[in-house]
């Protein structure tokens, strides 16, 4: 974790928890915009540039990116305890929501109205994922980038290869390709 | 739903493994969840998987909510909690311990190559995820395909909040039009 720029005021643990819990529970359709606004604009825990740097790391490593973000920011202020408290802030409220939703779905999920409603949600949510992929895809630059993206797509979408098998084969090849290209 | 230790163990070991290989985030690893829950374990139909994903998207919280919703469907409240924890803990430990090293190595060529090499794979994964979810959710209904396509156009062409698309999709679906 980078801990050079300790802000003027270190937030107490309780504030760390409530701030992340608030961002998490406000996050309809994605927590990221709320987390960014909370950390950069409202609390001023991070500068815009620090946020961008930290987020690119959190997006790149495995796991949910906003969850990783809460761990990194919590650790920056209070070490392991801070990481834990921020993580709990991020996860406890949605866990309660899941328990409510699950109960609701088991009770009413099979009624025709609800089945139709959830089907519509699923269709729109699938479109959201495609649009995110296309936006990210606009950052690809070279032909080899497109080639590896196409291989990953084919492996998962058509050949239905388990994710781990795909990564074990393609990740070293793609990294080696980038390494050789840069020498 | 009776508590089945083997099912819980399956959920925990699967999500703990997925947590450490989910490059590109939770959305990019949805095809693998689909493969495991629908094809491998036969815990639900493809159609149901898509509906549960829709519910997870309508709720507030990080996009890993879908993990808890799937866990709930398979093994009830305990299933939701253990799945959520198994998905969150390993990657969080990874973020905590690797964060420092990674930051110090930011300008090393190998680090740049690793990052540049993984980006195209995550794009391909995310696109595969969108493709499979569209297949599962729309399932041959042209109206449902139109909702997915409309959402894609809306998100690419406007800066408005995507929650509108979810609301419209839910409304059309609720009226039985999809």
Image: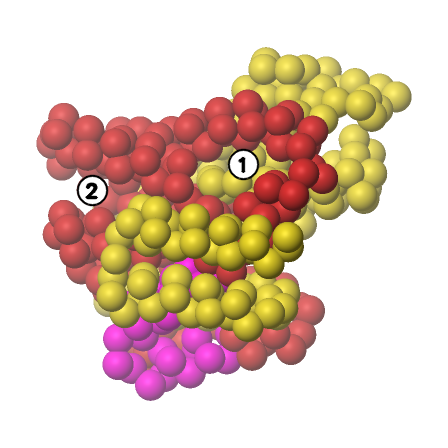
Chain colours: A yellow, B red
Chain of the residue that carries numbered disc 1 in the rendered image: A
Crowd rating for badge 2 (residues with CA inside 10 Å; few <14, some 14–19, many 20+)? many
Crowd rating for badge 1 (residues with CA inside 10 Å; few <14, some 14–19, many 20+)? many
- Nearest to the observer: residue A100 or residue B77: B77
Residue A22 has which mark? none
Chain of the residue that carries numbered disc 2 in the rendered image: B
Q: Which residue is mark 2?
A: B74
Q: Which residue is mark 1?
A: A67
> Farthest residue in the front direction?
A183
**Position of A58 compared to B56: left or right?**
right
**Position of A70 compared to B33: left or right?**
right
Q: Main secondary structure of the magenta part?
A: helix
What's the residue at 64%, 55% (across, down)?
A: A182
The percent position of residue B12, horizontal first and vertical second, equals 27, 31
Quarter-wise, where is residue B137 in the image? bottom left
- Nearest to the observer: residue A43 or residue B30: B30
User: Magenta residues, as a range?
Assistant: B123-151
The residue mark sitting in front, 2 or 1, is 1
- Nearest to the observer: residue A108 or residue A62: A62
**Position of B170 compared to A159: left or right?**
right
**Which corner quadrant holds the N terminus of chain A?**
top right
Quarter-wise, where is residue B148 in the image? bottom left
Magenta residue check for A100? no
């Amino acid at each position: 974790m980078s801990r050079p720029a300790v802000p003027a005021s270190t937030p107490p643990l309780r504030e760390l928890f409530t701030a992340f819990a608030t961002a998490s529970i406000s996050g309809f359709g994605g927590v990221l915009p709320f987390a960014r606004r909370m950390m950069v604009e409202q609390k001023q825990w991070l500068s815009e540039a620090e946020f961008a740097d930290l987020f690119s790391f959190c997006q790149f490593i495995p796991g949910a990116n906003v969850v990783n973000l809460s761990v990194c920011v919590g650790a920056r202020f209070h070490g392991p305890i801070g990481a834990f408290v921020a993580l709990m802030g991020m996860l406890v409220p949605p866990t309660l929501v899941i328990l409510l939703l699950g109960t609701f779905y088991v009770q009413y999920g099979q009624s025709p109205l609800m089945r139709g409603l959830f089907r519509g949600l699923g269709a729109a949510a699938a479109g959201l994922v495609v649009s995110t992929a296309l936006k990210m895809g606009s950052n690809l630059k070279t032909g080899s980038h497109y080639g590896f993206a196409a291989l990953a797509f084919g492996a998962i979408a058509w050949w239905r290869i388990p994710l781990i098998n795909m990564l074990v084969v393609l990740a070293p090849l793609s990294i080696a390709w980038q390494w050789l290209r840069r020498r | 739903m009776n508590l089945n230790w083997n099912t819980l163990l399956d959920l925990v070991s699967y999500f703990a493994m997925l947590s450490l290989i989910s490059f590109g985030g939770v959305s990019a690893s949805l095809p693998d969840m689909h493969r495991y829950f629908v094809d491998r374990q036969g815990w639900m139909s493809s159609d149901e998987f898509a509906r549960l994903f829709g519910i997870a998207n309508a709720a507030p919280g990080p996009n890993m909510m879908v993990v808890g919703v799937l866990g709930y469907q398979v093994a009830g409240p305990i299933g939701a909690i253990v799945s959520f924890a198994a998905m969150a803990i390993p990657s969080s430990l990874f973020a905590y311990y690797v964060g420092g090293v990674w930051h110090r190595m930011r300008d090393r060529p190998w680090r740049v190559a690793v990052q540049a090499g993984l980006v195209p794979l995550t794009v391909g994964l995310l696109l595969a995820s969108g493709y499979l979810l569209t297949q599962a959710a729309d399932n041959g209904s042209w109206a449902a395909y139109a909702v997915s396509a409309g959402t894609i156009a809306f998100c690419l062409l406007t800066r408005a909040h995507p929650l509108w698309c979810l609301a419209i999709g839910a409304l059309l679906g609720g009226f039985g039009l999809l």
